[in-house]
Image (spheres, grey):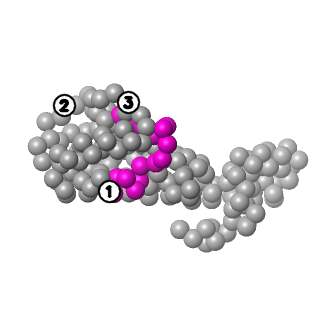
């Protein structure tokens, strides 16, 4: 997405949302409503840019998952010991190396292209450097199908949105 098309001023692009929010509060308290409106719009535009980026990162995560290729998953999983995953029916797996080991184990048993995931009830929240998605995964994987409630947390690392936490839990409905 081209940021210039959203009409943010150059100084607003470099200003953190938290700082813009403080400036907005000051402008409102001074009854400088013209500046307040400009700041409000800049905040909304920056949040929209981040939200779209998190939506794209979420799509890349599921594309990697459905590809069955560990190399693709490796591109989207974040760096750091705070990276975590909770697969349905498992406990928390923490640390990038262990998380990638868990994805290798899962993908080793999946025929490439056999794993299909459709999403429902997708909700996205994003700030400048982190965001999360909650959704329902509709899974179809050859011999099993079902619904998983998922939360995906993304962090901007070196300018790239990467998943740092995936939590999947089965719904009350049964898996077949």
Residues at marks 2 and 1, CA–CA distance in whole angstroms: 31 Å
The residue lying at 47 percent from left, 51 percent from top is 162
Q: Please say if 71 is above or below 21.
A: below
**Which mark sits nearer the N-terminus, 3 or 2?**
3
Within 10 Å of disc 2 (Cα), the crowding (few <14, some 14-19, many 20+) is: few
Identity of the residue drawn at 73% across and 67% down: 10
In the image, residue 76 lies in the stretch drawn in magenta: yes
Mark toward the start of the polypeptide (1 vs 3): 1
Query: Where's the C terminus, which quadrant?
Result: top left
Which label was assigned to residue 85?
Answer: none
Q: Secondary structure at mark 3?
A: loop
User: What's the distance in space between the residues labelled 1 and 3, CA to CA?
Assistant: 22 Å
State whether residue 116 is above or below residue 102: below
The residue range painted magenta reads 72-86
Q: Which mark is residue 174?
A: 2
Q: Nearer the viewer, residue 80 or 133?
A: 80
Structural crowding at the residue carrying mark 3, measured as other residues with C-alpha within 10 Å and reported as few (<14), some (14–19) or many (≥20):
some
Left or right: 25, with 135 as reference point: right
Label 3 and label 2: CA atoms lie apart by 22 Å
| Percent x, y of residue 35 | 81, 57
In the image, residue 54 lies at what x, y percent? 48, 53
Q: Residue 137's image quarter? A: top left
- Callout 1 secondary element: helix
Q: Nearer the viewer, residue 41 or 92?
A: 92
Q: Position of residue 147 (x, y in %)?
A: 25, 39
Check disc 1 and report the residue beneath it: 71
Task: Place residue 56 in its image quadrant.
Answer: bottom left
> Which of 73/6 is in front?
73
């Amino acid at each position: 997405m081209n940021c210039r098309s959203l009409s943010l001023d150059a100084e607003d692009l470099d200003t953190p949302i938290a700082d813009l929010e403080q400036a907005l509060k000051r402008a409102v308290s001074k009854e400088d409503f013209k500046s307040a409106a400009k700041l409000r719009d800049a905040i909304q535009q920056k949040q929209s840019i981040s939200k779209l980026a998190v939506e794209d990162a979420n799509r890349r995560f599921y594309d990697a998952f459905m590809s069955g290729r560990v190399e693709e998953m490796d591109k989207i999983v974040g760096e750091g010991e705070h990276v975590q995953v909770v697969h349905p029916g498992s406990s928390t797996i923490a640390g990038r190396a262990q998380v990638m080991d868990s994805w290798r184990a899962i993908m080793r048993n999946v025929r490439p292209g056999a794993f299909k995931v459709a999403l429902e009830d997708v909700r996205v929240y994003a700030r400048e450097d982190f965001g999360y998605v909650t959704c329902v995964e509709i899974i179809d994987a050859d011999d099993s199908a079902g619904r998983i409630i998922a939360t995906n947390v993304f962090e901007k690392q070196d300018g790239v949105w990467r998943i740092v936490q995936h939590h999947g839990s089965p719904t009350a409905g049964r898996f077949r």
